[in-house]
Amino acid sequence: MKKITELEKGYYGIFGGQYVTRDIAKALKQVEKTYLKFKDDEKFRDELAYYLKDYSGRETPLYFAESLTEKLGGS
């Protein structure tokens, strides 16, 4: 399977796109413009990675459930 990483005008390869109202499209355009301005900034990327991991639930960190592990006889 080919991994598609390039995004061009809302499309991933031959797939994708978006259907949104004009008001939402304006807001998304502003988000895109701002992201493109800061995407190569190391401080921004570090902060984004932090929020994706610890706030939004992406890359969910595993929780060691010590009491449950003990109750079930170890891991």
Image (cartoon, grey):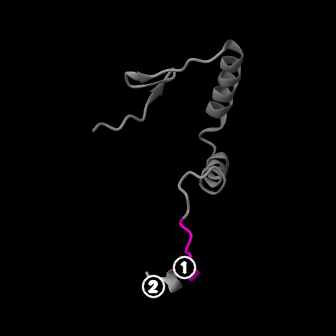
Q: Amino acid at mark 2?
A: Gly
Which secondary structure lies at badge 1? helix
In the image, residue 64 sits, relative to residue 18, either above or below, namely below
Determine the image quadrant of residue 67.
Answer: bottom right
In the image, residue 15 sits, relative to residue 44, either above or below, namely above
Residues in magenta, as a range: 62-68
Do labels 2 and 1 touch, CB within 8 Å? no
**How far apart, in angstroms, are the residues tagged by discs 2 and 1?**
9 Å
Mark 2: few, some, or many residues within 10 Å (few <14, many ≥20)?
few
Q: Quadrant of the C terminus?
A: bottom left
Identify the residue at horizontal 66%, vertical 26% (top origin).
33
Determine the image quadrant of residue 40.
Answer: top right
User: Residue 55: where, in percent of width, then height?
Assistant: 66, 53
Q: Quadrant of the N terminus?
A: top left
In the image, residue 75 sits, relative to residue 49, either above or below, namely below
Which residue is under mark 2?
Answer: 74
Identify the residue at horizontal 61%, vertical 38% (top origin).
39
Residue sticking out furthest to the left: 1
Instruction: Decide which of 57, 74 is in the foreground and name it.
Output: 74
Instruction: Decide which of 17, 74 is in the foreground and name it.
Output: 74
Residue sticking out furthest to the top: 22
User: Residue 68: where, in percent of width, then height?
Assistant: 54, 79
Which secondary structure lies at badge 2? loop
Mark 1: few, some, or many residues within 10 Å (few <14, many ≥20)?
few
Instruction: Decide which of 6, 38 is in the foreground and name it.
Output: 6
Which residue is under mark 1?
Answer: 68
Identify the residue at horizontal 37%, vertical 21% (top origin).
14
Give the label on residue 26, or none: none
Q: Amino acid at mark 1?
A: Leu
| Mark 2 or mark 1, earlier in chain | 1
